[in-house]
Image (cartoon, helix red, strand yellow):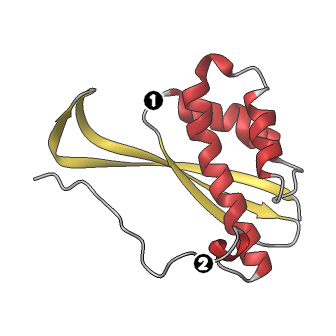
Amino acid sequence: MRITKVDHWLVRMPFTEDILWGSGRRIGTTRLVCRIETDAGIIGWGETISLIANVPAVFADIVAPLAIGYQVSDVERLHRHVLGAGFYHHKRAAVMAIAALEMAMWDALGKQAKLPLYALWGGKWRQDVEAAAYLFT
């Protein structure tokens, strides 16, 4: 199953109040959402944070064009291809951009196999998973 099309959108969400933290002031968050289509007609969705301005450009100019024709199962191979494509001077942006596509590839693989991702990744290890989240007031 090969990737035939890659689309992406930026979603900007302003915060009701600015957040101050170690790296400065955050007035909102921006996410890059991507959608892949495969030759089998399966759609995969992914998203990533866009903390730095270069993420959308790296995705549009490097990641998306390189992805066309790849097998959705070649997640690691595509990751290495993108990082080797000369965008090493913006590696943080490249890693963020690749994350969205990888998520979409895994989504498509799970849909094709009709299995949850944990089954593709070796099986269920525990019933409950601890999680943490930040709440800003």
| Residue 79 percent coordinates (x, y) | 74, 40
Kind of residue at badge 2:
Lys
Residue 60 seen in render: yes
Q: Which of marks 1 and 2 is in front?
A: 2
Kind of residue at badge 1:
Ile
Q: Please name the residue shown 65% across and 42% down the image.
A: 98
| Residue 56 percent coordinates (x, y) | 56, 36
> Which residue is at the front of the view, 10 or 107?
107
| Residue 109 percent coordinates (x, y) | 76, 69
Crowd band around label 2 with a 10 angstrom C-alpha radius: few (<14), some (14–19), many (20+): few
Residue 43 seen in render: no
Answer left or right for 10 relative to 91.
Answer: left
Q: Residue 34 carries which label?
A: none
- The residue tagged 1 is 52
Q: Earlier in the sequence, mark 1 or mark 2?
A: 1
Crowd band around label 1 with a 10 angstrom C-alpha radius: few (<14), some (14–19), many (20+): few
- The residue tagged 2 is 124
> Which residue is at the front of the view, 125 or 49?
125
Q: Do the residues labelled 1 and 2 touch (CB within 8 Å)?
A: no
Answer left or right for 131 relative to 100.
Answer: left
Q: Please name the residue shown 69% across and 63% down the image.
A: 106
Answer left or right for 80 relative to 55.
Answer: right
Q: What SS does tag 2 mark?
A: loop
